[in-house]
Amino acid sequence: MSFTVYTIEMAYAHMRQLQELANRSRAHQSAAAPRSADKSRPARAKKR
């Protein structure tokens, strides 16, 4: 049985990646808000 070493650097890099994705998503949504107001639910990120 092998265990994956998950370092704080890996966690930090992943959080930074999610933050960048959230910032891009927020910028895109604010720009597209007038024409996407009829969507019933927000799109979800893909699970890995």
Image (tube, rainbow, N blue to C red):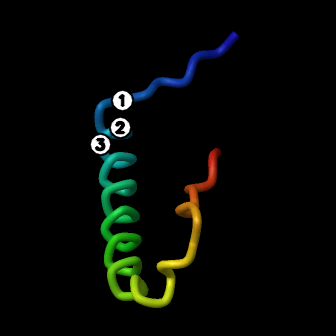
Which residue was labeled with disc 2? 11
Q: Nearer the viewer, residue 40 or 15?
A: 40
| Cβ atoms under marks 1 and 2 closer than 8 Å | yes
**Under tag 2, what secondary structure?**
helix
Residue 21 sits above or below residue 13 on the image:
below
Which residue was labeled with disc 3? 12
Q: Could you tell me how far apart the alpha carbons at marks 1 and 2 are, in whole angstroms?
A: 6 Å
Residue lying furthest right: 1
* Residue type indicated by callout 1: Thr
Task: Identify the mark at residue 7; answer none if there is no mark.
Answer: 1
| Cβ atoms under marks 2 and 3 closer than 8 Å | yes
Task: Identify the mark at residue 26; answer none if there is no mark.
Answer: none
Q: Position of residue 12 (x, y in %)?
A: 29, 42
* Residue type indicated by callout 3: Tyr
For the point 40% across and 82% down, the residue is 33
Q: Could you tell me how far apart the alpha carbons at marks 2 and 3 are, in whole angstroms?
A: 4 Å
Of circles 1 and 2, the one toward us is: 2
Residue lying furthest top: 1
**Under tag 3, what secondary structure?**
helix
* Residue type indicated by callout 2: Ala
For the point 31% across and 68% down, the residue is 23
Q: Could you tell me how far apart the alpha carbons at marks 1 and 3 are, in whole angstroms?
A: 9 Å
**Under tag 1, what secondary structure?**
loop
Residue 48 sits above or below residue 31 on the image:
above
Q: Position of residue 21 (x, y in %)?
A: 40, 64
| Label 3 packing within 10 angstroms: few (<14), some (14-19), many (20+) | few
Name which of mark 1 and mark 3 comes first in the sequence. 1
Pick the quarter of the image with the C terminus. Answer: top right
| Cβ atoms under marks 1 and 3 closer than 8 Å | no
